[in-house]
Amino acid sequence: MENFVFYNPTKLVFGKNTVEKIGEYLKKDKVKRVLLLAGGGSIKKNGVYEKVVRSLMENSIEKIEVWGVRPNPVLSKVYEAIEVAKKEKVEAILAVGGGSVIDSAKAVAAGVLYEGDVWDFYLGRSNPKKALPLYAILTLSATGTEMNGNTVVTKEETLEKFAFGSIHVYPKLSIVDPEVQYTLPSNQTVNGAVDAISHVMEYYFDGTKRTDLIDRVDEGIISTLIETTEALLNDPKDYDARANFALATTLALNGVSGMGHRGGDWSSHAIEHALSALNPDVAHGAGLAVVFPAWMKYVYRKDPSKFRRFGRVIFRLKHSTPEKAIEALKKWYKKIGAPITLKELGFKREDIDELTEIAAKTAPMGKLVILEKEDIRKILEIAYEEE
Amino acid sequence: MENFVFYNPTKLVFGKNTVEKIGEYLKKDKVKRVLLLAGGGSIKKNGVYEKVVRSLMENSIEKIEVWGVRPNPVLSKVYEAIEVAKKEKVEAILAVGGGSVIDSAKAVAAGVLYEGDVWDFYLGRSNPKKALPLYAILTLSATGTEMNGNTVVTKEETLEKFAFGSIHVYPKLSIVDPEVQYTLPSNQTVNGAVDAISHVMEYYFDGTKRTDLIDRVDEGIISTLIETTEALLNDPKDYDARANFALATTLALNGVSGMGHRGGDWSSHAIEHALSALNPDVAHGAGLAVVFPAWMKYVYRKDPSKFRRFGRVIFRLKHSTPEKAIEALKKWYKKIGAPITLKELGFKREDIDELTEIAAKTAPMGKLVILEKEDIRKILEIAYEEE
């Protein structure tokens, strides 16, 4: 087990009828004027927007709205929201939506108080020293951004999909009401499951030895995601399945799943970012369903016993091997309707070159195995050819 | 699953060679003068005191020392430390020791800034509105107090062993260095294991339905404690066993193990408090090893499937029943050298009356089953007679 520091100051408010409490919480914190950041309008259909607006009104909190954050969020929208936030002198950012909205809101929160270009943070040229307080209402459980300090945004012009993390952009408060997710299209639940499972696996397979406790916690998160995804595909309004699913996605990336690890591997995430940078219609979760098993095939020889254990514990394989474990994961992804090849995502073989170029911008990458550009290409080739 | 709010602002600094960082952390927080609260002197034997003193000196931090916090800490020592803290105008409390020292330090931190009697908090007559910042260096993993806002103290005159919880007394920073625990007597490791397992079981068996994810997390914590306790009895200097044990005790009571639960049952803890109030030589963990299985026997009919699951998952019983599961737990307690009857703790049958009286001061208690005074007596009788 490795040394670690855990510090997570986000207050998580979880459960039924919690969205309508946002106004009270803001009032308690003496916030009077917020920038409400949102996506394409789903929060108007599922009733969340109405509840938020009423709660803000009842607590005399003014709001300025910026709409249009899209999946795989882009830098131009962040710039737009920063301008509005500055002009309107808001005291806090209120993100209402899924991971893309909250990730963008983190950039806005830090960007408003930064003299330079917010993209500097993503390039690693500067670190946020402060940020406006961020409040989040999560409407799609997947990325875990509601309880961490990470954000991923794409710069359209260069197809760079980069991330940064800062203690200053942890949401001060995040509300997770599983009921508002009853109406999600099933593919979004599936993508969320794959994303969260991948987050846990990035730690689980990073090669750290004797992480006995967190291995069990991580296996518990993955097993719960598998079980509840199947339950939700069967009945999207199974409250307890939604709740356990949602909590699992939060714990998958709030620091607990990586305690005592050496930071996670994150190669699969970096490679996936190239996929959705090149084609923004590729959902992050769908991309991960394709890339992660390919990465596993490429690297498992470095730590075969862990991959064997994965198959035994998660898929209850009696005679588990790394290969069988990876096949079991792919089979399950297929079962829930996730893609497992680059082909299915609409990529052509000749795209591998460009994907490699984009992904290699952050190479060398990884922990279990350090990947150079040629390794990335080989993984993409596995991801393409696989049945 | 129940609604819940999770908020835990403690920064956990975990691993090798972390004790000596305390001065830097205090300096970063601009603390210049601390009250160092400690126990009976074990921190001088294990080298922790020397490291702390050097680190404080190197960072120009003054300290005033108060020694003598004993296991099952008492109110009189808290009063003494509050007086010193006030007189010496310290800016923070630095607790160096086990759960008793940290619990006492929480009372001191809140008591210094309170006009009235700090015992008011334990009586529920008042709640802390503020507290001095608390820093902790944990030298005995057991109670989980290093990452929560709970404190338990005994008032000697009345034998009342009461608790309170407040967001204001969460340690701002807790350092857990597993290596400093290499020299612990094995019975302290055993008591720590029983205490932490009991914390998790208070939630696990509180009767909440469909806590799928946290059941798995809780089972992971318990299984890890079982495995690492055995490893440590065999080799007290097995670093990874110490580290996983320590982390398990922290997660057992930092809020994660109870997410989505209805607050835990806590009857066994309340009954145990009577034991160590009447006889301060009874370690909290030892008392719990006796009381918890007796409580289980008394209540399991209310939720037999959960007790069956416990036997199946934790002790891998092929044909688990609640009775077999409880027997397996007692057998394991016996195996590691924990007492399992009141007799072994030195109590006589006639003590049951007084124990009942003391414990019943907080009756009715419990969640899975609401216990009145007569229920408590019956549980104590089971605890006495059991072989």
Image: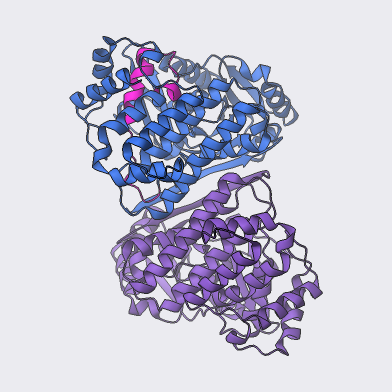
Chain colours: A blue, B purple
Q: What quarter of the picture does the C terminus of chain B occupy?
A: bottom right
Choose top left, top right, bottom left or bottom right for residue B34. Answer: bottom left
Q: What quarter of the picture does the N terminus of chain B occupy?
A: top right
- The location of residue B256, given as percent across then percent down, is 55, 51
Left or right of residue A156: residue B358:
right
Of A95 and B206, nearer the camera is B206
Of B211 and A57, nearer the camera is B211
Of B385 and B112, nearer the camera is B385
Tell me the residue at 64%/74% (across/down): B291
- Asked if the stretch drawn in magenta spans residue A257, the answer is no
Left or right of residue B369: residue B135:
left
Tell me the residue at 67%/43% (across/down): B3
For residue B126, above or below residue A333: below
- The location of residue B113, given as percent across then percent down, is 60, 64
Q: Give, as a single range, the part of the protein colored magenta.
A: A259-287
Left or right of residue A66: residue B174:
left
Choose top left, top right, bottom left or bottom right for residue A384. Answer: top left
- The location of residue B331, given as percent across then percent down, is 54, 73
For residue A74, above or below residue B317: above
- The location of residue A128, given as percent across then percent down, is 39, 34
- Asked if the stretch drawn in magenta spans residue A266, the answer is yes
On the question of residue A125 being in view, the answer is yes
